[in-house]
C-alpha cells in the first residue's frame, strides 16, 4: 500500500514558487522550557525569568532559536516534502534577525530558490528551499536556506499508479 503524500514532487518545485503555509503555531512557555531542557541547553536567557528580566536587553526569556528553527522547518513539511523527500542534505544558511518570545505566533513561507536533477540518482533531484518565519507582527524572525533530495513524480504504469 502506498502512503498518501501532501508534499510536492521534484518536478512541481520550480524556482520562484512561494508557498504560504496554512499552519501557524503559537510558541508557549512550556514548549520553550521543554525543548531547551531536553536538548541540554542551560542558557539562562531561555530558562531563568529573573535573569532575563534584569540582565538582558529583552526583559523576558527568549524562545530557544533551535526551537524556532525546528518549527520553521516542521511547519513547511506538510506542503513541501511530506512523502516526497529522500533526505535533508543540509543547511547553507540560518539566521535569526529578531527574537521570538513566549506567546508569539510563527507563520512560515517557503520559496524554491533552485532545483536540478541529481547527476547520480535517477528519478531524484536537489531542491534549494528558503524558509522564512515571521511573528504575528510580520517581523522576520528566522530564515533558513537548505537543500533537500526530492523524488521525481512517479510515472503511471499500464494499470495506473
Image: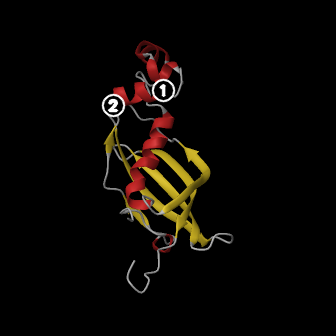
Closer-to-camera residue (100/8): 8
| Front-most of residues 54 and 153 | 153
Render colour scheme: secondary structure
Marks 1 and 2 close (CB-CB < 8 Å): no
Q: CA distance from mark 1 to mark 2?
A: 16 Å
Q: Locate the C terminus by quadrant.
A: bottom left
Q: Residue at x 46, y 69 (%)?
A: 9
Disc 2, SS? loop
Q: Nearer the viewer, residue 110 or 37?
A: 37
Tell me which corner region of the image, top left, top right, bottom left or bottom right, holds residue 121: bottom right
In x, y percent, where is residue 40? 54, 24
Q: Residues within 10 Å of mark 2 (few under 14, many from 20)?
A: some
Residue bearing mark 2: 28
The numbered dot on residue 38 is: 1
Which x, y percent locates residue 147? 58, 58
Residue 79 figure quarter: bottom left
- Give percent across and percent down for residue 62: 44, 28
| 81 lies left or right of 22 | right
Counting from the top left corner in percent of width and height, residue 29 is at 35, 26
User: Is tag 1's residue or tag 2's residue first in the polypeptide sequence?
Assistant: 2
Secondary element type, mark 1: helix
Identify the residue at image location x=47%, y=74%: 153
Amino acid at each position: 500500500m502506498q502512503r498518501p503524500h501532501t508534499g510536492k514532487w521534484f518536478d512541481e518545485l520550480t524556482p520562484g514558487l512561494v508557498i504560504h503555509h496554512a499552519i501557524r503555531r503559537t510558541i508557549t512557555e512550556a514548549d520553550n522550557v521543554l525543548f531547551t531542557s531536553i536538548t541540554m541547553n542551560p542558557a539562562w536567557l531561555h530558562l531563568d525569568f529573573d535573569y532575563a528580566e534584569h540582565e538582558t536587553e529583552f526583559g523576558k526569556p527568549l524562545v530557544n532559536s533551535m526551537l524556532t528553527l525546528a518549527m520553521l522547518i516542521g511547519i513547511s513539511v506538510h506542503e513541501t516534502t511530506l512523502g516526497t523527500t529522500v533526505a535533508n542534505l543540509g543547511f547553507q544558511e540560518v539566521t535569526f534577525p529578531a527574537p521570538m518570545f513566549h506567546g508569539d505566533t510563527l507563520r512560515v513561507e517557503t520559496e524554491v530558490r533552485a532545483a536540478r536533477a541529481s547527476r547520480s540518482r535517477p528519478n531524484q533531484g536537489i531542491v534549494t528551499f528558503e524558509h522564512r518565519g515571521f511573528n504575528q507582527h510580520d517581523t522576520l524572525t528566522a530564515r533558513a536556506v537548505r537543500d533537500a533530495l526530492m523524488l521525481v513524480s512517479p510515472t503511471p504504469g499500464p494499470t495506473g499508479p
